[in-house]
Amino acid sequence: MKCRKGCGACCIAVSISSPLPGMPGGKPAGVRCANLLPHNTCSIHGTPAYPEVCRALVPSREMCGASFDEAMRYLEELERATQPEA
Ligand code: SF4
Ligand code: SF4
């Protein structure tokens, strides 16, 4: 499937450990990426600054669901499931 324009769930829900423009230490889970515009599109998509980690993400029905809310639920659950034990 294609990325749903204006979704942005994966730019909020997931943690990203590699540096992002404006976020040199990466991004914690549940925090909006600094490059995510208010209407949930990426301000640097299609530019040379677009990070490799975002380029590599492949949208899928399983991850993205049918709505922003479904994607958030899936991704938040994934974050919980992949968190290292405290
Ligand atoms: S969760 Fe899927 S549809 Fe939503 S922004 Fe990410 S890749 Fe695109
Ligand atoms: S750089 Fe763009 S695509 Fe990547 S997480 Fe941030 S807003 Fe999303």
Image (cartoon, rainbow, N blue to C red):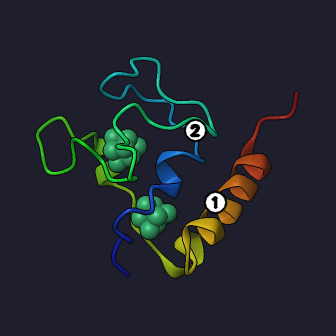
Mark 1, secondary structure of its residue: helix
Instruction: Kindly identify the residue that appears in the image at 78 percent across and 48 percent down.
Output: 80
Look at the numbered disc 1 and say if its residue's Cβ is closer than 8 Å to ligand 1.
no
Q: Position of residue 11 (x, y in %)?
A: 47, 47
Say above or below: 59 vs 25: below
Choose top left, top right, bottom left or bottom right for residue 78. Answer: bottom right
Instruction: Kindly identify the residue that appears in the image at 11 percent across and 39 percent down.
Output: 48
Q: Position of residue 69 (x, y in %)?
A: 63, 67
Say above or below: 37 vs 41: above
Q: Position of residue 28 (x, y in %)?
A: 59, 31
Rendered-image quarter of ligand 1: bottom left
Residue topped by disc 1: 72
Say above or below: 84 vs 47: above
**Closest to the observer, 70 or 82:** 70
Say whether residue 47 is left or right of residue 86.
left
Q: Position of residue 19 (x, y in %)?
A: 38, 25
Q: Quadrant of the N terminus?
A: bottom left
Q: Quadrant of the C terminus?
A: top right
**In the rendered structure, which amino acid carries the disc numbered 1?**
Met
Q: Is residue 53 visible?
A: no
- Outermost residue to the front: 38
Q: CA distance from mark 1 to mark 2?
A: 13 Å
Q: Earlier in the sequence, mark 1 or mark 2?
A: 2
Instruction: Kindly identify the residue that appears in the image at 78 percent across and 52 percent down.
Output: 81
- Mark sitting on residue 53: none
Mark 2, secondary structure of its residue: loop
Residue density around tag 1, few if under 14, some if 14–19, many if 20 or more, within 10 Å: many
- Mark sitting on residue 15: 2
